[in-house]
Amino acid sequence: MNPILLNDIEYDRQLVKILEDPEITDEEKIALIAGSASNNLSAKETANRYLWVMTNLQAQADAKEARAKELKRQADVLSRQVEWFKAGVKNYMELKGIKKLEMPDFTASLRESKSCEITDSKKVPGKFIEIIPEQISIKKGEIRQDMLKSKEDSREYAVLIKHNNIEIK
């Protein structure tokens, strides 16, 4: 067991709780730590005590970061599985010619949409180009809207790509 006295450990726990208060500024927190050393402890004992608390807190932070990474990995796996099932339902509905499935717990429906694919960025008219510092951005959404409005499926610089999307509610 660490040679820190139990009342010092409890004091440090209370200090950590106080330090979690968002209304206390960083400067106030640093001053609080610096001024909280017990008068009956030597400088070496005080430094040891705070280094022990600090390494303990860092170990907790590291463990939580590792747990967060693992949870993110698990969430990514589940999201990929959802996408596989969604694609499977979509393929089944397309194969069977089903536009809408209404079930007690959910509804799945196919809807058609179009996206804009740029075929020659050098021929895109200026009104569809946005210059962002150090990069040029083509406004594909505006080109798509303009093409849909004029009922064009292709231009010399872009084509509309037809998609069947599945929506599950």
Image (spheres, grey):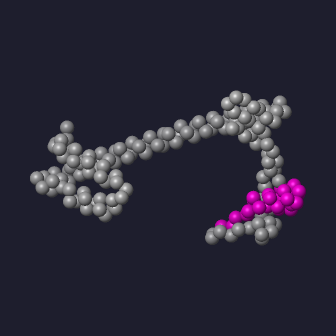
- Who's the residue at 29% across and 52% down the image? 18
Single out the residue that lies furthest toward the front. Answer: 104
Range drawn in magenta: 135-159
State which quadrant residue 139 falls in: bottom right
Magenta includes 90? no
Please tell me whether residue 79 is drawn above or below residue 130 in the rendered image. above
Image side of residue 11 versus residue 89, left or right: left
Left or right side of 80 for 156? right
Question: What percent of the width, then of the height, locates residue 87?
Answer: 72, 36
Quarter of the image with the C terminus is top right
Q: Residue at x 83, y 30 (%)?
A: 96
Task: Please indicate, yes or no, whether residue 114 appears anywhere in the rendered image.
Answer: yes
**Among the 4 quarters of the image, the one containing residue 132:** bottom right
Q: Is residue 54 visible?
A: no
Q: Residue furthest left?
A: 40
Report x, y in % for residue 168. Answer: 70, 38
Q: Residue 16, image x and y in percent? A: 29, 50
* x 79%, y 48%: residue: 113
Residue drawn at x 85%, y 59% as measured from the top left:
149
